[in-house]
Structure formats: structure tokens, C-alpha cells
Amino acid sequence: MNEDNSVLWRNNERASALFYDLLARAEQDAYDDDFLMQLAAYREAVPTSERADIFAAKYLLHHGDAENAAACAERACRKRPVNREIWLLLAAAYTQLDRPVDALTMYGYAYGLYLAPEIPMELLHRGGKEGLDRLSIAAGIGTGAPMTQNRARLADHALEFQLDAFVGEYFPLTPPAESARYWVAAYVDNAFLSDPSQVIEKMRYTDVFVDRMQRDYPFCLQKAQEVRGRVTIEVPEGAEVILPIAGTEPLQELTITTETQPPASAYLGKWAFSQFRLTETTEITPASDAVYAVGTPIRLGHSPARRKLVLNILIDGLAWNIARTRFSDAMPNIARFFERGTIFDQHFSTSECTYPSLPVIETGRYPIHTQVFNERDSHEIPLDMMTLSECMTDLGYYAAAPMGASDSLTCGALRGYDQLNTAAWKLPSAEAADRAIMQLEAFDETDQFLYLHLSDVHPWNAKGLKFHPAVESHLSLSERLFELDEHIASVRLPRLKIYQEQFWRSLRRVDRNLAQLLTYIEEHYAEEEYLVSVYSDHGNSIFSTPVNGVMDVIAENSTRATWMMRGAGVPEGRIVNELTSTADLYPTLGALCGFPVAEDIDGNLPAVFGGKERDAVYSMSMFPGQTYKLAVRTHDHTLRLETQEKVDEDGTVDFADAHVGIYPRAHELEENYALDSAELRAFFYPHARSIAREIANNGEFWPAMRKARPEWFGNSTKEHL
């Protein structure tokens, strides 16, 4: 790498030579003193590389030191959690250390991506139900939970994977210390409690349920404990709590008794939570030995250190670059509400789609640090990366998501919510607003942190999609009919009139539906009692023109996102021109609500809230099997980078010979407008390198990973291998 900025990136040839020397020795099991000498030289050449720890773990495991091998591999996993070499090392080490559940998790990650290696039967028996459940999640994709294509089970002394859902049981994630696990129920509202469970029982192992109904089937995840028999719920004198309880049988009967309440029956639904208000210590006695789930008690009461309501509303795919041109016309109610708040006019998402973007919002960290980028992977974000909901819960808020997407469930970005109502696809604003108001009414005696995720605006491939009736009835045939490849992803949808009209109609629909919620807030809360944020996770492509026949997935239309706030601590009547990122919501809520923010996050507190203005914002696409793309934007200019090589399964890529250009913001990727000066390079190149060095592989790769993806990399190998 040249620091004179004549070249943005140059690989370290000495480190690469040492890597391939170590690789050749490892393939020959030549773990001797010469190996250690080369490893020391490699670690000195690239002290932050996870590959040095991988080689160290291989050496230690070869010599029978499973404990230290695991420590090295875990250190590598922290930086590169989606990596076959690391998974197999940890699987072997954990097996030797008698940690069968952890070993099965690592085997599951590898099997989910590569359908290999074969999972030892002896380990499956040692892991028990918890091991099979963790294997199921690890071998599955990162979206769609609690449904899965890969529920592991043992049948006739063989491992099978089947279609299923985690329901009526714990969802097998690693819970934070002193936190209950999520117990999965069906979402039931104003209906017979056990009806949804009976539908699930009939359909759960079928592709109709898992592949079709998963798009809009709602689940309720509640932090709870499974219990049998009598339970005593201690309620301190003078306190009151709301207790969620769910059954595992239809009309499951409990007897509830307190000092002042004589024994009386309560009836639970199967896999459905009901709420009970307790004002004193209560004894619960079931009529049978069947399991039931007792949720974490919700303590009532307001603290002056908290707001009564902090509400986050994510409108998926709301491209601010487009919406801002007709904001007051297309979304008059939302525009009116936020006239008394702050609107960020230069706000950008870090990614082009929800899966990597949502964890950025919930952790304040870019995808290069969460390493949530590969939808075929389901690793968990480290527990010491505090999520937004965990921070708010620590402040004493009751955290709930009346409507949320399941995208970030398995990675743990939503793990701090006490209750999550999720669906994989259909998240309509009308139902979200109604659920939110019901939530506010039900828990009006406690301080609430609520999260809504709405999908009305998000564009989807039109093949087989039902459009808004007014779109279909008003377009001419020439605009209504179209040719479209059904395999085109939503981030690359073309500039069609029908998509654009759907966008504008959806904005009005969201505005109309959220109006009742925003009005309710204004009528029931004083301005200093609430904080409301509306934002998006990315834009969309349907107003963009392809560049050289290819849709630019990190163009302004695809990454210029929405962010507006109103309430206590938010300046009134401001349209702010400073650059902001989706990572910035996290530190902003930290400053306004009072939770501590880690120093190593990527988010920045905007100047309007007392922080410092960004000098640049970053948008990136790190999708495995595609070239890596980066945009570094200032108010006036943009650096655009695209690698020649494709992103590997572990998120790394070779930046050597990447195409780099600097352009005026209004003319990105237009070569006739390309700019080059020492001053521009001196500013932009260090910014781009700060991102690249986190995922650059220096031309070093693991052959087995490449061999498994011939459709990406072909069958060739490096000539020096």
C-alpha cells in the first residue's frame, strides 16, 4: 500500500508468500519448528490477520492442545465468523473439550453453506435436543426464523433435515447473561387462543407452510421460562406487574391464588400468550403436568429519568432521494408531524438491502464489523456488542416490537426486546399502527421502547405480485404489461412505471395508516414525554437508470435513506444538511435517552445533537459471489470503488487492481465526469482504505472455500499452489 496516494491499494507480497508457504506446510501436516518460525514471521507481517490465528490453531490442534487451539480459533472467529476453516477447527476442538452443543453449532455452519462435512453420529447423541436445535439454526439461512428448511432430527439412527418451525419451545439462541430465552408462540389477536396452533400442527412440516405461509405468518417471541407444576411469582409490596403466560395444550387450566384472591381458574391457549395483572405475590397451580411458559414479569411504573415512550418506526425501502421531492404531498401526515422535529436530508444507508442494514441500525456498527452480510449464514453477533434494545432495557424500558421482521432474529440484533412479534415478509402499516396503539394502551403504566418494521413501500419482483388496486386500475396497458426475469433481486429492479406508481401509492398508504398512531401520540403524551424516530434501512432502484446496462446497487436512489425525529431533546423545525449514516441512530438514542455508547462503534452523534459533523458517509455492497462495491460520499464528491474479484463466502475480497474513481455527487460512475487530483485522493483514499483493510484478503484464500464455489471462481487455483 502506497501512502503517497498514487495507488489506493497494494497487496503485501511478503505476507502472501508466507501465507502460501504455511498453507503448503499445513496440507502436509508439517507442524514443526520451521512452521512456527514461518508463522511468527507471518504474524509480524500482518499482526491483525485472523489467518495467523487459524494457522496457530491448526498447529495446536495437531499437537493435542485443544484448549489453546480453541482460544486461537475463537479469536479468529471474532473477526471472521463466516469462515469454513475456523468452523472446522472449532468443531474439532470443542469435540475434544466435551462441548458437544458448541461443536454441533460449528458443524452446522459449515454444513449449511457447503453440505459438508459429515456430522459425527456420536456427537449428535451427546448434544441431545439442545445440540440438534442449535445445529438446525446453524445449518439454516439467516432469514425466515422461526421457520426453517433445516430442522435437524435423528431418525432410524441417521441425521435428517426437515421443513419445520420452532414453535411451542425455546428459540435456540445464546441468551445474554441473566436473560431468559425467547419462547416461540403464535401471534393471536382477538381470536380463539388455540386456533393458530392447530393450523401450525396440520401444516408445519409442509412446503406450503414453510415456503409459502412464511411470508406473512406472524409469530410471538416472548422472553419466558418453561415450567411444570406449581410456580410462585414474587411481587414486592407496593409493586404491580403484568405476567405473560402461554400454554402447550388447548384450554390448559391453571389455578391462580393470592392472599386476597381466592383460588380461581385461568385458561391458556396452546402456544399463545395471555397477560395477567398481579398486585401481590401469586401462586400458580396447573391442573396437569403439562409444560407452560411463564414470561418475564413486566414491572409497571414510570421513572422521571426515562421518557414514557420511545418509538422507532422503520419503513423498509423508503428512498428519501425520491420521497423528498413530493414529501408533503405523498406523506402529508408524517410531514406535518415532523415539522416540529428534525429531518436529516443527507442520510445514507450502509447497504443496499435489509439483511446487512438492520444490524447496523441496532448496533451502530458497519457490516464489516458485525459481519452480517451473507443471508446463507446465521452466526450470532458477539454478546459484548450491545444492541439498541439491550441498552434501552438496561435503562428500565419495557422493550417490545409489535411488528418486526425476522431478518435479524438469528444474528441476535433484536435480542434485547422482551417481546417480538415477527413475520418474514408481510408487515403492513395498517396492522402495525393498530398493534402499536393496542400496546400503548395495554402498557400505559410503564415506560416503553417500541419498534415497528413496515414493508408496504419495499419493492418486490413483479412476477406473481399483487399491486395496489389504484395502480392496476389507472395504468394503461402499455404501462401495466412488462417483461421481467423472475430471478431479478429487489435491489436490481428496473425503472418501470408500475413500480414507480406502486411506490407513490404505498407512501400514501403508510402515511394514512401511521396518521392514527401519530395522532394518538400527540393526544396522549406531552412533547417532553416521547421520542419518535422514522427511518429506512435503504432506498431502492426503481427510479434509477442502469450504468452500462447494470443496475448500480449503491447509487444514491438505492442508499439515500430516510431519518427524521421528534420529541424531547430534538430541535424543532429543522431540516439538517449534515451527512448522516444509518449507524448514527444508535449513538443518537444513546445521547438522548442516556445509555452509554461503546467507543469502537462506527456510528457518529450528529452535530445537531451536540456531536461532530461527519466528513463522509459510507455505503457498501459485500454480497458473496459478486464484486465488492464501495461509495464514500461527501457533500460534493463521491469515491466509487469496485473490485475485480468477487467477494468470498467469508466476506473477504482482493482489493488489488480494484477500479477506483472520484466523481461529482450528481454524476457518479459517469466516466466523462471523473476527477483526479492529489487533494481529492489525499482525502478519499484513506477513508476507502479504512473500510478495505477490514475485509481485504491480500490475495490469500483458503482453497477448499474456493473449490466449493466454482460458479463464482471457476476451477482454477493460484498458480503458486
Image (cartoon, rainbow, N blue to C red):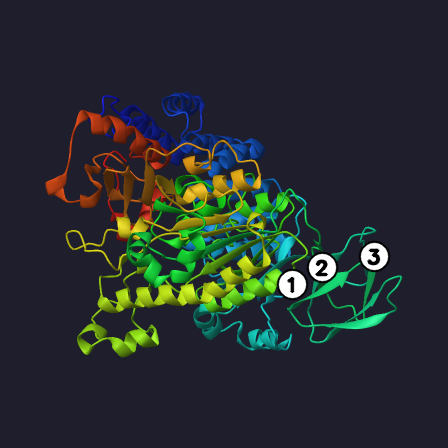
State the CA–CA distance, disc 2 to disc 1. 10 Å
Q: Position of residue 588 (x, y in %)?
A: 48, 40
Tag 2's secondary structure? strand
Identify the residue shown where x is 81% and y is 50%.
236
Identify the residue shown where x is 34% and y is 31%.
690
Check if mark 2's residue and mark 1's residue have beta carbons within 8 Å: yes
Crowd class of label 1 (few under 14; some 14 to 19; many from 20; radius 10 Å): few
Identify residue for label 3. Answer: 281
Q: Position of residue 391 (x, y in %)?
A: 58, 43
658, 254: nearer the viewer: 254
State the CA–CA distance, disc 2 to disc 3. 12 Å
User: First in sequence: mark 3 or mark 1?
Assistant: 3
Identify residue for label 2. Answer: 242
The quadrant in which the C terminus is found is: top left
- Label 2 vs label 1, nearer the camera: 1
Tag 3's secondary structure? loop
721, 351: nearer the viewer: 351
- Label 3 vs label 1, nearer the camera: 1
- Vertical order, 510 against 579 (above or below): below
Identify residue for label 1. Answer: 442
